């Protein structure tokens, strides 16, 4: 009988508290759906085969980790808000004869129902919208439309595991609250006065330090290889700093202003500052979540629009000529043969060649270490991710071609090279 009673009480609790449960369920469904969508796009083979698709998937895979971390913080906040509103109901269960163990079983069933609805609906929404996301990516990358529909079971299982673990942690937090709170305090939770907020200097200073370090990384990082993963390190730091500053920094600031008697003991400041401390204590995490979500949307939209609109300018700056022909070898016979093919094609279409630039080059990558450039691939593999900012692309051009193009008269002895920097701050 008891085992049948627990799910009934759990479902009634969800239904009767619909005004607070439905927004909570909507938030859970949203984060599950977005997590699956980002994971699907980051591993979709159709996008990977497009030009630039593999590089975009690297960024999306890092975005999956960001979404997972944000989900933990966001869902814990919404769950704590939900528990505050339900303490009186749970205290009433205890007064009617249910002990903490029985209430824990009710919470377990509630959590199972919530997780089932959130995961089921969120994954269904993610699967349905995955094709729309794929088509949007194909449009942005100017790829060919693929009309097939697929479900990425690896991402499906990853989503189940990730949010299954999050819901398990939420359940543990709920049960811990029940066992740590007296039944009478649960019943009187709504009528109990709120404790005055305390200034947490450590959290406030840590938040300020994290925010300053994140902006320092963003501003000082110049190398394209290092900037991708350092950007996401900065994102994690900004998320943590935002929560710390809204929850602890705001209260600390109010405490500092309160100690200033000339400022505090004024009609306009006395009441507003005192109420502000309590409001920030209650709603700091919510405001931080809104701030982070708004920033994510703004960065995503502005970044996407800027990249999309700047495609033509980027193309013109990297390839100032309309036609680029590469030969697979520097052998004179192959070079002459390719030249004849190009000349024949131009003659066929009646096009006159202009502004021709012809040179030989050897392209490679190396890792700078002091005043050396290490070209050994095996040795470069021993470097850590933090040293990827030292990667340089090297283009070797014969001195004869350099003099012809630049109009100079440089000469080199054996074992000598002429170093020319472009768009980097590395010096010999």
Image (spheres, rainbow, N blue to C red):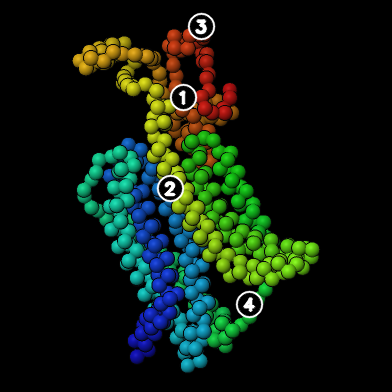
Which residue is under mark 1? Answer: 394
Q: Name which of mark 2 and mark 4 comes first in the sequence.
A: 4
Q: Nearer the viewer, mark 4 or mark 1?
A: 4
Q: Distance between the residues labelled 2 and 4?
A: 40 Å
Look at the numbered disc 1 and give the secondary structure of its residue. strand
Query: Counting residues from the N terminus, which is met first, the one under dot 1 or under dot 2?
Result: 2
First in sequence: mark 4 vs mark 1: 4
Q: Nearer the viewer, mark 3 or mark 2?
A: 2
Q: At 39% across and 23% down in the image, what residue appears?
A: 320
Q: Are marks 1 and 2 in contact (CB under 8 Å)?
A: no
Circle 3 is placed at which residue position? 409
Farthest residue to the front: give it: 267
Q: Where is residue 161 in the image (x, y as percent from the top left)?
A: 38, 62
Q: Residue at x 61, y 69 (%)?
A: 279
Q: Mark 4 points at which residue?
A: 194
Which class describes the residues within 10 Å of circle 1: few (<14), some (14-19), or many (20+)?
Answer: some
Q: Which residue matches tag 2?
A: 301
Pointers 3 and 4 in contact (C-beta within 8 Å): no
């Amino acid at each position: 009988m008891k085992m049948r009673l627990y799910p009934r009480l759990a479902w009634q609790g969800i239904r009767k508290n619909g005004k607070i449960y439905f927004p909570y369920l909507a938030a859970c469904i949203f984060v599950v759906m977005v997590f699956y969508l980002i994971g699907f796009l980051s591993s979709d083979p159709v996008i990977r085969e497009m030009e630039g698709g593999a590089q975009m998937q690297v960024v999306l895979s890092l975005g999956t980790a960001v979404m997972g971390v944000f989900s933990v913080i966001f869902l814990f906040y919404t769950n704590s808000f939900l528990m505050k509103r339900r303490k009186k109901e749970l205290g009433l269960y205890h007064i009617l004869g249910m002990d903490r163990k029985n209430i824990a079983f009710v919470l377990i069933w509630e959590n199972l129902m919530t997780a089932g609805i959130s995961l089921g609906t969120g994954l269904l929404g993610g699967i349905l919208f995955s094709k729309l996301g794929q088509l949007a990516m194909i449009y942005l990358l100017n790829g060919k439309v693929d009309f097939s529909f697929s479900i990425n079971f690896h991402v499906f299982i990853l989503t189940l595991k990730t949010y299954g673990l999050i819901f398990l942690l939420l359940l543990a937090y709920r049960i811990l609250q029940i066992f740590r709170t007296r039944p009478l305090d649960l019943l009187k939770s709504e009528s109990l006065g709120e404790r005055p907020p305390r200034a947490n200097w450590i959290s406030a200073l840590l938040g300020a330090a994290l925010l300053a370090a994140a902006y320092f990384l963003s501003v000082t990082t110049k190398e394209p290889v290092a900037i991708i993963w350092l950007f996401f390190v900065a994102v994690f730091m900004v998320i943590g700093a935002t929560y710390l500053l809204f929850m602890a920094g705001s209260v600390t600031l109010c405490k500092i202003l309160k100690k200033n008697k000339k400022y505090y003991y004024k009609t306009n400041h006395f009441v507003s500052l005192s109420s502000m401390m309590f409001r920030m204590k209650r709603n700091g995490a919510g405001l931080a979540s809104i701030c982070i979500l708004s920033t994510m949307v703004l960065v995503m939209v502005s970044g996407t629009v800027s990249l999309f609109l700047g495609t033509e300018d980027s193309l013109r700056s990297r390839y100032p000529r309309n036609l680029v022909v590469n030969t697979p070898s520097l052998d004179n016979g192959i070079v002459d043969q390719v030249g004849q093919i190009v000349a024949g094609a131009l003659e066929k279409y009646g096009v006159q060649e202009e502004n021709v630039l012809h040179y030989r080059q050897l392209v490679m990558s190396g890792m700078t270490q002091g005043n050396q450039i290490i070209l050994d691939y095996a040795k470069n593999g021993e470097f850590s991710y933090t040293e990827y900012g030292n990667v340089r692309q090297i283009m070797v051009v014969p001195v004869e071609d350099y003099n012809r193009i630049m109009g100079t008269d440089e000469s080199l002895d054996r074992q000598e090279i002429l170093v020319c920097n472009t768009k980097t701050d590395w010096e010999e």
